[in-house]
Image: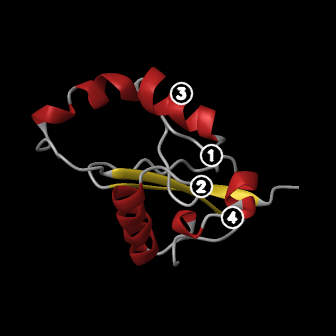
Amino acid sequence: MRHHDLAQLNIGRLVAPTDSPLVDALADFVYRSAHAPFLRRRREWFERMDETYSVLWWVPAGHRPTVSEAIERLDHLRKHGATPSAFTFRHRFTADEEVEVADPRDVCSV
């Protein structure tokens, strides 16, 4: 039984799969599929951003995050770096780590 889905906010381009993939499957799609050549050319369509513009986090299965929740997660990532509450493809956490978090700095207020 699935207990968590993966949420993503990407300011430049939101990839919204029709199914809730595992983190590896989503990373494969973004970086190793037909999407990759477009990702490499993103500077042709988007300004370079100096700050983090993409965030991942686990949500309870069936929950659909709001835009304000996504922005709060992105702000959390920008302020604290990758934590179980807000992370990146490069610095990932499992859904279990999100649940077990003990450090208050790692907890997003959403």
Q: Which mark is residue 93?
A: 1
In this rendering, the answer to whether 30 lies above or below 8 is above
SS assignment at label 3: helix
Q: Amino acid at mark 4?
A: Ala
Q: Where's residue 24, x and y in %? A: 61, 32
- Tell me which label, 4 or 3, sits earlier in the chain: 3
In this rendering, the answer to whether 35 lies above or below 21 is above
Are discs 2 and 3 less than 8 Å apart at CB? no
Quarter of the N terminus within the rendering: bottom right
Residue matched to label 4:
102
Crowd tier of the residue under label 3, counting other residues whose Cα lies within 10 Å: few below 14, some 14–19, many 20 or above: few
Q: Which mark is residue 64?
A: none
- Res 36 → quadrant: top left
75 lies left or right of 85? left
Are discs 1 and 4 less than 8 Å apart at CB? no
Are discs 2 and 1 less than 8 Å apart at CB? yes
Q: Amino acid at mark 2?
A: Pro
- Tell me which label, 2 or 4, sits earlier in the chain: 2
Q: Amino acid at mark 1?
A: Phe
Residue matched to label 2:
84
Cα separation between marks 1 and 3: 17 Å
SS assignment at label 1: loop
- Tell me which label, 2 or 3, sits earlier in the chain: 3
Q: Amino acid at mark 3?
A: Asp
